[in-house]
Image: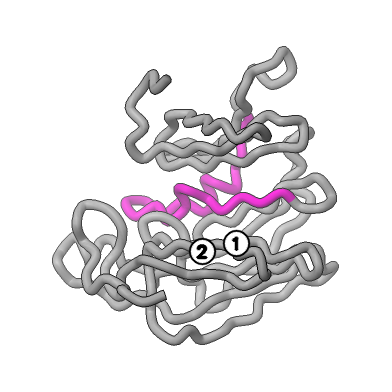
Amino acid sequence: MVQTDVWCSSGSATSDGTLVQTGGFNDANHLLPDGSQIIVGGRDAFNYEFHPKTASTNNVFSLPFLQQTNVPREENNPYPFVFLNVDGNLFIFANDRAVLLDYMTNTVVKMYPQIPGGDPRNYPSTGSAVLLPLKNLRSEKVGAPKGSYPRAAKCDFVGALNTCGRITITDPNPQWTMDTMPLPRTIGDMVILPNGNVLIINGAVSGTVGWQIARNPVLVQ
């Protein structure tokens, strides 16, 4: 049953396939090993919380990393990319960098280098990301360049990035590898297929997400 407006919110499927829509604004959900969900970030929400609530998780936990990656009037860190690492910690990417978070102790255990070029990959630049199969645990991201949102709001539709960054999140000294994609793309979706390939679909060639300020839809995958 939908109990609130789900516009710009996030959700995640439980282990039995039930979709839980938490109703936050520009946040990200991720299923945890105990079956609960963690809700990370959102507009002016520099924190995380859990669903359902328990005696030990009945609070909102501050995450300064989200404030550090927030750009005034542009943001570039809502809908952070969140992945569960094999060590039980969370890989969280926001704007142009990432951390590894021990969410049980609210401790950042690793900081990753800034993605080359420093261009944002999250809303409203809105790239997409996947965690590749466990054999290499590489995270991939695409997106739009700095300043895309305020310029698009003035009808100056900047071309999207044509780069894809990859990083092995379990590496003791992780470094980004940058690939050039066949075409620029923002607001796309990335999905891992059963054969291990990544399908990238939808999006736009220029502009940015929201408020009808994207242009030139990508009609090929």
Residue 129 picture location, percent across and down:
55, 62
Rendered residue at 24%/64% (across/down): 214
Residue 102 in picture, x, y percent from top left: 77, 42
| Residue 130's disc number | 1
Asked if residue 76 lies in the magenta stretch, the reply is yes
Q: From the viewer's perspective, is residue 142 above or below residue 153?
A: below
Pointer 1: residues within 10 angstroms few (<14), some, or many (20+)? Answer: many
Secondary structure at badge 2 equals: strand
Would you say 138 lies left or right of 151 here?
right
The residue drawn where x is 31% and y is 58% is 209
Q: Which mark is residue 67?
A: none
Question: What are the residue bounds of the magenta stretch?
Answer: 61-84
Residue at 47% x, 52% y: name it: 77
- Quarter of the picture holding the C terminus: bottom left
Q: Nearer the viewer, residue 30 or 91?
A: 30
Residue highlighted by disc 2: 190
Q: Quadrant of residue 173?
A: bottom right
Mark 1: amino acid: Val
Q: Residues within 10 Å of mark 2 (few under 14, many from 20)?
A: some
